[in-house]
Amino acid sequence: MAMLHIVNKSPFERNAFKSCLDHAVAGDSILMIEDAAVGAVDGTVFADDLKAAMTDKSVYVLGGDLAARGMSEDRMIDGIKVVDYAGFVDLTADNDKTQSWV
Amino acid sequence: MKYTVMVNEGPYQHQSADSALQFVRAALAKGHEIFRVFFYHDGVNNGTRLAVPPKDDRLLQQEWSDLAKEHDLDLVICIAAAQRRGLMDADEAKRQGLDADNIIEGFRISGLGQLIEGSIQSDRTIVFGD
């Protein structure tokens, strides 16, 4: 029963993203959209939390939202996968449930 | 796969109204069914026909309306949220004794039960908003 967690808040502004990491379980997927996309950048105070989650969860970022915030993909944490809206739809279909951390 | 989408944020407020529209377009492009889009809280403002943004900006309300016409979508606005924010269809305006209505073609006003029913009928419910 894998779940897709959709996060849209920056981890540097709200604690929704951290709450998501605390609740997600092994085998789940996490998709960063909107302001949450900045969480994909490596070398931040949040990066270690996300890397720890990535040991047993898949992490994705909506490429357009990352680019819209001036972040290039080569600054991302290794292992994060970039998806477009079609990929977003596929993630919602491939996981049994979705949870939006609004 | 069958989807119900919930939109809790108004147009031009942040990004979620745009995200929801893009998601619905992508889901339709992949052949999925959008059973219902339910607009709640400030999301009801996606259904006004009186918005006039600058010419070089997108008109989100019209884009929803056009998409609804093209794909026969069921766009539902929560009645309690709509009343609070001055969003009326002709029947509701008449019932309230008001002199105008402002809902854009393709939307309808109904209750929160439509969201629950949508979630029951659909394989997935995706929430967008602040």
Image: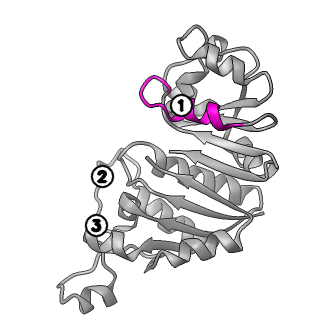
Q: Which residue is mark 1?
A: A36
Q: Position of residue B113 (x, y in %)?
A: 52, 78
Q: Which colour style is shown? A: one colour
The subunit carrying tag 1 is A
Q: Position of residue A31 (x, y in %)?
A: 66, 36
- Please say if the residues under marks 1 and 2 sit with CB atoms less than 8 Å apart: no
Q: Is residue A19 magenta?
A: yes
Give the residue displayed 32% in from the left and 49% down from the top.
Answer: B55
- Residue in the foreground of this view, choosing between B59 and A38: A38
Q: Position of residue A58 (x, y in %)?
A: 77, 30
The subunit carrying tag 2 is B
Q: Which residue is mark 3?
A: B50
Q: Secondary structure at mark 2?
A: loop
Residue extending furthest top?
Answer: A43
Q: Residue B33 got which mark?
A: none
- Residue in the foreground of this view, choosing between A19 and A69: A19
Residue extending furthest front?
Answer: A22
Q: CA distance from mark 1 to mark 2?
A: 27 Å
Above or below, comparing residue B20 to residue B80 in the picture: above
Viewer-nearest of labels 1 and 2?
1
Q: Amino acid at mark 3?
A: Leu
* Dot 1 and dot 3 within a common chain: no
Q: Secondary structure at mark 3?
A: loop
Residue B72 appearing in the image = no
